[in-house]
Image (cartoon, rainbow, N blue to C red):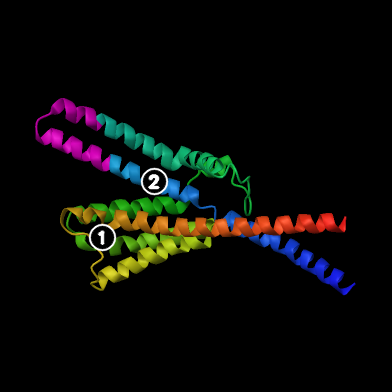
Amino acid sequence: MKRSDDSAEEADDRVREIPNWARRYAQNRTLPVVASLAIFAVASCMFGGLSYLTAWAYVNDRRVLAGASMLVLCGFAVWWLWFSFVGGARIMRRISERLYQGEGSVSVGACVGDEELRRPPPGVFVFVFCVIASTGLGLLGFLPIRYMQPISALYVVPFMLYLGLRQRPGGSPFMCLWPALYGLHALLDVAGVPVRFLGELRALDVFVPVIGYGLIAALAGHIYSRVALRRLRQLAAGADVDGEVEG
């Protein structure tokens, strides 16, 4: 009789664990973050490549090529604005559904409607202003280019934390690694640790840490989601077996 009671208690414990592991799994489905970072990296390369091609063609008196590349650059800039403020959220949601189509649909907290997806958070405009202002002041010589990564950390880290707070409770705790590592990189840079690029690669001082630390955080969350999914399946299978035995 006691053994039967112990088995029933263990089964109840497994059932009570299921919601916790389901929440952990749902929070850490971070592959869409990897996809968005890849899109951002490609877009940055496109902007840089087209800008360089336009400038090279103009300097070398290739007016037709300069005009054509400028048109392509402008068209891509318009598309990027549309993607950033209008269509990107819906596209990323479809990518997420495709990436996890074999694992079903799961969410934490309230669902976000299309109207909210179309409306960017207010902090985005402050962040964009800070990016444009710091870049412009750096090009004009008012801010030291060699310290652009630590300077950018002054608004990048708060913005990442702001986005993390907005996504609660559905966001992955592992994404906190992103601003933490970016801020640590800035402190090491100011302290004189050789973590910056040199020469012509100096432009990568901000780009590489943003992409690299984002990938580290997203992949850490993804690995944990695999652990959570495996545990969730074990608990569900155990609950099914207990139900069949009791029946």
SS for tag 1? Answer: helix
Q: How far is the residue under mark 2 from the one under mark 1?
A: 23 Å
Query: Residue at the location (34% across, 42% down)?
Result: 42
Q: Is residue 57 magenta?
A: yes
Report x, y in % for residue 4.
86, 69
Q: Crowding at label 2, few (<14), some or many (≥20) Cα neighbours within 10 Å?
A: some
Report x, y in % for residue 179.
41, 63
Q: Image quarter for residue 59?
A: top left
Considering only order in the chain, which callout, 1 or 2, is on the residue closer to the N terminus?
2
Q: Which residue is mark 2?
A: 38
Q: Is residue 193 above or below residue 207?
A: below
Q: Is residue 229 left or right of residue 152?
A: right
Q: Is residue 61 left or right of residue 37?
A: left
Report x, y in % for residue 236.
71, 56
Report x, y in % for residue 185.
32, 66
Q: Is residue 130 above or below residue 12?
A: above
Q: Which residues are magenta?
A: 47-70
Callout count: 2
Q: Which residue is mark 1?
A: 148
The residue under label 2 is which amino acid type? Answer: Ala
Q: Residue furthest top?
A: 64
The residue under label 1 is which amino acid type? Answer: Met
Q: Image quarter for residue 160?
A: bottom left
Q: Specify the principal SS of the magenta part.
A: helix
SS for tag 2? Answer: helix
